[in-house]
Image: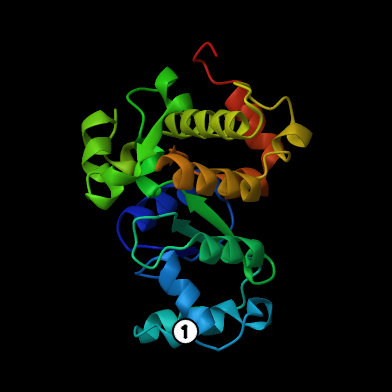
Amino acid sequence: MIVEGEKADYKLMEHLLQLFFETEFYIVPYKTNIYALYDMFKINDTDDFDMLDTVQVLKSVQADEQVKKELDKAFSDIILIFDFDPQDPKYSEEKILKLKEVFTESTDNGKLYLNYPMVEAFKHLSCVGDAGYLHLKVLYEDLKGKRYKRIVSGYTFQTDYKQYTREECLAVFRQNIVKANYILYGENAFPAGEEEYFKIDLDKILHIQCGLLKADEEFYVLCTCLFFLLDYKPKALLNEIKNLAYGW
């Protein structure tokens, strides 16, 4: 798994993997953002990113020899967890759409999951079952002014990712699944089963978010880094979420 940062991103994904993942995993902090990743692919002077080897590109910018050795291992899947971060000077809609188009398959070049606006979206909840989360958006001016993390810190019911229980994590999963469904279809509803869950199109959500950013300078807060777990074992997790004792 490739994550953007070595602090918040790493900490959250390590916790989620320990709680929900039974097989061996390895987390590599890329230590910079999605637009720097784009530049690393573009430096090869080609638009055909599909022909590039993700692991080799990552190794080329990695100074840590131990991490390079770990990247030499055989991986069954590559998961990339990054932030949308439209306030970055290198942001462009074209770049982010290109990367989402390329990274669609975990067993090939890798599958990309974006957090809107960043990984802190996971804890942008005042309580378990926060009704306001469905319509919650982030202002571009708060991102550019570097206020978003502070806003989340003063709003959340739990600041430490490591302190989220399995049940609380599942509740966060539920709210983001429902919100993704709402963004796409205008429905405040949890999927009835796997078939409905897989109708949640994260590529289409990116297009919607880019459109909102351009038109209104705001977009929906949404955490998608957890979706890779649901994609991996949808039936078990969807059933577990449905059985949460929160009266939903």
Toward the top, the furthest residue is: 247
237 left or right of 135 in image: right
Q: Position of residue 63 (x, y in %)?
A: 34, 85
| Residue closest to the eye, 66 or 175 | 175
Say if 222 sits above or below 186 in the image. below
Q: Is residue 72 visible?
A: no
Residue drawn at (58%, 35%), measured in percent from left and top?
180
Q: Is residue 128 visible?
A: yes
Residue drawn at (46%, 73%), measured in percent from left and top?
37
103 left or right of 152 in image: right
Residue drawn at (66%, 28%), measured in percent from left and top?
239
The quarter of the picture where residue 3 lies is: bottom left
Q: Position of residue 74 (x, y in %)?
A: 62, 77
Q: Position of residue 206 (x, y in %)?
A: 57, 49
Say if 60 sits above or below 226 in the image. below
Q: Position of residue 7 (x, y in %)?
A: 30, 58
Quadrant the C terminus occupies:
top right
Say if 70 sits above or below 20 in the image. below
The residue tagged with tag 1: helix, strand or loop? helix
| Residue closest to the eye, 124 or 194 | 124
The amino acid pointed to by label 1 is Lys
201 left or right of 20 in image: right
| Number of residues whose C-alpha sits closer than 10 Å to that of mark 1, classed few (under 14), some (14–19) or many (20 or more) | some
Residue drawn at (53%, 62%), measured in percent from left and top?
96
| Residue closest to the eye, 199 or 225 | 199
The quarter of the picture where residue 14 lies is: bottom left
Toward the right, the furthest residue is: 195
Specify the color scheme: rainbow
Q: How many labels were placed on the picture?
A: 1
186 left or right of 217 in image: right
The residue singled out by tag 1 in the image is 59
